[in-house]
Image: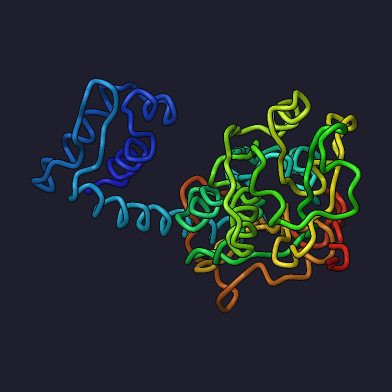
Amino acid sequence: MELRHLEYFVAVAEERHFTRAAQRLMVSQSGLSASVRALERELDAALFVRSTRRVELTEAGRALFVEASRALASVRSAKEAVAAVQGLLRGTLSVGTEQCIAGVDVPSLLARFRSEHPEVEIRLRQAGSAALADDVAEGRLDLAFVALSCSVPDGIRLLPIGRDRMVLLCRPEHPLAGREGVPWSDLGGETFVDFHADWGARRRTDQAFAASGTQRRVALEVNDVHTLIELVGHGLGVAVVPRPVALKPQAAGLCTVELTGADTCVWEVSAAVPDDRRTTPAARQLLSYLPAAARSADVSTGDGGPTGPGPGHAEGTGGEGAGTGGGPVIPVPAPRG
């Protein structure tokens, strides 16, 4: 069984599409398809259910995907060990972030990393925190900046960066505007604009309403902070958002109202890193740019020897004393109400 065949198989499994997988690997689609067919012949099992639009893994394919990912990670770990001896930092740094994450200036972090380590290819994925956490756990990302509101998924740990309260955002003429505080139970009759369900802020808000025993109606779901602000500005609903969102210049014409009895509704920003293997050298270097609270957290496991990174990770070593950077840590105000 050739490693190249496994690499091609994993790419198709992740992309769910032969053409996209071939483009990602920069190989011909015919060569990619031939490799997958050769692997299926060797295993005497169909690995994909093929259709004109996409491909899906069979039961045998799902079983192979887990083991193939581990095998490729072990190979990259071996390369990383050699690169570490040579004092090199190279390969790929895969980072994820939720949109408008507070306490972290992701573009500035990546720009600094690129200027100091031009040999490392940077890949960025933007999605909801839940999906990003899964990507870190499964080895598709080196680290991710997230705001998780649920239990930490198996396979990752969180390095805290900052936290803040959730607030109500509404138009100035709204009946709730100008009040010093509003209990969650008073919001049951409102029409809401909110993020999709896998965003950390949405999950935190849903939990707070459930804890207060209040039902609400989310009429408009968006996947963009600025669209949410515009919809609230046009009077199509109110929104519960992390305070940094309410402080954005685009929200200057709206009113921010504190929510009372919301002690459990705190938006917490963290860096999610793998829990079952040593954090990659490139990821450690990026983390070294963060404020001291996150930098002081332990970002490696084991006895100091490298263990397997996930697909596409950087290889080599990177110092941890590169200084600080990113946005400020946001303190949580004292509970009110």
**Looking at the picture, does residue 301 appear above or below residue 197?**
below
**58 and 112: which is toward the camera:** 58
Left or right? Give the position of 97 relative to 18.
Answer: right
Residue at 13% over, 48% down: 43
Quadrant location of the C terminus? Answer: bottom right
**Looking at the picture, does residue 159 appear above or below residue 255?**
below
Left or right? Give the position of 219 relative to 289.
Answer: left
Q: Is residue 200 visible?
A: yes
Q: Is residue 86 visible?
A: no
**Looking at the picture, does residue 167 appear above or below residue 266?**
above
Q: Position of residue 2 (x, y in %)?
A: 26, 46
Which residue is situated farthest in the left direction here? Answer: 44
Residue at 91% over, 44% down: 178
Residue at 73% over, 40% down: 100
**84 and 195: which is toward the camera:** 195
Residue at 26% over, 37% down: 56
**298 and 78: which is toward the camera:** 298
Q: Position of residue 5 (x, y in %)?
A: 27, 41
Q: Quadrant of residue 57?
A: top left
Which residue is situated farthest in the bottom direction here? Answer: 303
Q: Quadrant of residue 172?
A: top right
